[in-house]
């Protein structure tokens, strides 16, 4: 039967500090190269936990749990509990057992810091850039290779990649930083719209995305395009100033 335990607390410098596996109660966190006792409710020590800095096959730290008990199961259980808690601090473990000596060893090695939800808009922009670069480069290569779209699953694969890119660029990157119920995602910080949609005629729209930089040459006064719709009507799309778009219907029409 597993002994009742007041507490198990394991900690060390930096990443392991304040990592506690508490079964009840707590105690001051030990420093590196120190020993923590695992005590049952009667006050008897049934195991000790030692945290030490070592250099063992590239594993810089070692946690040793040692017990005089013939039954290693409870010691293993408590060690695994310690390991699980320390994993949450961004460490990984290799756990070994020596049944003859009654020793369990967990070798933690620091990896990347714990994942944080506090990533910035710039982080999202970087993700968009790398995803767009890979996906669009693949699309350009595929579309530029004669017969490539006829290969098995070529279109399905490309469609899947583009759909994933669409989700990241158009949904995830914004919703990560702007409330879904807010209109903030529709405007830049200076109040300009991120895009303007103009309906030319029923079923025909022109969508103009704007640059985040209000001084971008793409958004300066200019004729964007002259287009002919299916109704044979000629339209001229004009940028009046950054963030402001106008559509002019021309008098003449073009022959089909």
Image (tube, rainbow, N blue to C red):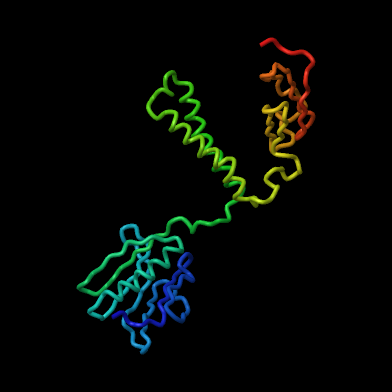
Q: Which residue lies furthest to the left in this view?
A: 100
On the image, the x and y values in percent for residue 130 come to 52, 39
Name the residue rendered at 44%, 71% in the picture.
11
Tell whether 75 sits left or right of 206.
left
On the image, the x and y values in percent for residue 96 come to 27, 65
On the image, the x and y values in percent for residue 155 come to 44, 28
Q: In which quarter of the image is the N terminus?
A: bottom left
Choose top left, top right, bottom left or bottom right for residue 209. Answer: top right
Tell whether 241 sits left or right of 131.
right
Reply above or below: 152 against 1: above
Name the residue rendered at 38%, 67% in the picture.
83
Name the residue rendered at 73%, 39% in the picture.
193
Name the residue rendered at 46%, 55% in the picture.
112
Reply above or below: 52 against 207: below
Tell whether 125 sits left or right of 252.
left
On the image, the x and y values in percent for residue 20 come to 45, 73
Choose top left, top right, bottom left or bottom right for residue 82. Answer: bottom left
- Could you say which is closer to the camera, residue 157 or residue 12? 157
Q: In which quarter of the image is the C terminus?
A: top right
Tell whether 183 sits left or right of 77.
right
- Could you say which is closer to the camera, residue 58 or residue 240? 240
Query: How many numbered marks are there?
Result: 0
């Amino acid at each position: 039967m597993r002994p009742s335990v007041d507490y198990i607390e394991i900690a060390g410098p930096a990443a392991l500090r304040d990592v506690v596996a508490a079964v009840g109660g707590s105690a001051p966190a030990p420093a590196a190269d120190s020993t923590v006792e695992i005590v049952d409710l009667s006050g008897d020590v049934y195991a000790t936990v030692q945290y030490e800095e070592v250099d063992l096959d590239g594993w810089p730290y070692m946690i040793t749990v040692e017990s005089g008990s013939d039954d290693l199961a409870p010691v293993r259980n408590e060690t695994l509990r310690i390991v699980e808690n320390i994993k949450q601090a961004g460490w990984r473990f290799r756990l070994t057992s020596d049944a003859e000596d009654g020793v369990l060893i967990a070798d933690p090695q620091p990896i990347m810091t714990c994942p944080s939800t506090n990533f910035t808009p710039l982080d999202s922009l970087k993700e968009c850039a790398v995803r767009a670069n890979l996906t669009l480069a693949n699309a350009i290569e595929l579309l530029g290779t004669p017969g490539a779209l006829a290969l098995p699953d070529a279109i399905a694969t490309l469609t899947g990649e583009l759909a994933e890119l669409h989700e990241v660029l158009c949904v995830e990157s914004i919703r990560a930083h702007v409330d879904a119920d807010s209109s903030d995602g529709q405007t830049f910080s200076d109040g300009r719209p991120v895009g303007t949609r103009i309906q030319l005629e029923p079923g025909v729209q022109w969508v103009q995305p704007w640059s985040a930089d209000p001084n971008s040459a793409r958004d300066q006064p200019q004729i964007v395009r002259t287009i002919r719709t299916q109704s044979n009507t000629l339209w001229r799309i004009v940028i009046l100033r950054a963030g402001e778009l106008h559509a002019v219907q021309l008098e003449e029409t073009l022959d089909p």
